[in-house]
Image (cartoon, rainbow, N blue to C red):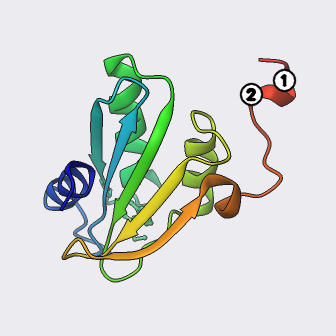
Amino acid sequence: MDALVAAALAARARAHAPYSRFAVGAAIRDEHGAIHAGCNVENAAYPQGTCAEAGAIAAMVLAGGRRIAEVVVAGAGLCTPCGGCRQKLREFSSGNTRVRMVDEAGSERLVRTLDELLPDSFGPENLGA
Ligand code: THU
């Protein structure tokens, strides 16, 4: 098992998901090779919960990373990033950034590029940024 998968699984083990009981972990490798992880954090006021990917992105930005080289999402069975998280990942990714989805054992279920997950996406370039 590679380090990114291990980080996603370790993050998944820390998930706070008492309402859905669906634990998710995400791990990002940034442009420096550093790994940042996050888990889903649900809330009694349901819409206030946050996804694992959002936590991993926040950790990356705090640590100084600004580009996503690769992502692993670990859920139960096949867990693909939600629409909102695809857009959040897109902010720091290129079209060919690889997103690997693994199950609770770390076995690969699906591999997609960011472009495949979010085609014709809107991003910083559209704002001239
Ligand atoms: N969830 C994530 O954290 N990431 C995903 O990629 C899909 C869904 C979370 C949100 C919620 O806490 C739970 O999984 C069930 O939707």
Q: Secondary structure at mark 1?
A: helix
Q: Are marks 2 and 1 in contact (CB under 8 Å)?
A: yes
Query: Residue drawn 30% across and 79% down?
Result: 76
Q: Answer with left or right where residue 53 lies relative to residue 90.
A: left
* Quadrant in which residue 16 is drawn: bottom left
The front one of 102 and 59 is: 102
Callout 1 environment at 10 Å: few (<14), some (14 to 19), or many (20+)? few
Q: Would you name the residue on which mark 1 appears?
A: 127
Left or right position of 14 against 120: left
Q: Amino acid at mark 1?
A: Leu
Q: Quadrant of the N terminus?
A: bottom left
What is the CA distance from the residue labelled 2 to the residue labelled 1? 5 Å
14, above or below 112, in the image: above
Quarter of the image holding residue 40? bottom left
Where is residue 106? Give x, y as percent: 23, 71
Q: Is residue 65 visible?
A: yes
Q: Residue at x 37, y 29 (%)?
A: 60
**Ligand 1 within 8 angstroms of badge 2 C-beta:** no
Q: Where residue 54 sits: x, y (%)? A: 43, 44
Q: Quadrant of ligand 1?
A: bottom left
Mark drawn on residue 118: none
Q: Which quadrant holds the C terminus?
A: top right
Q: In this picture, is 113 found above or below 92? A: below
Indicate the position of residue 17 as horizontal and vertical percent values: 25, 65
Amino acid on which the number 2 mark rests in the picture:
Pro
- Specify the quadrant of the image occupied by residue 82: bottom right
Secondary structure, mark 2, is helix
Tag 2 residue: 124
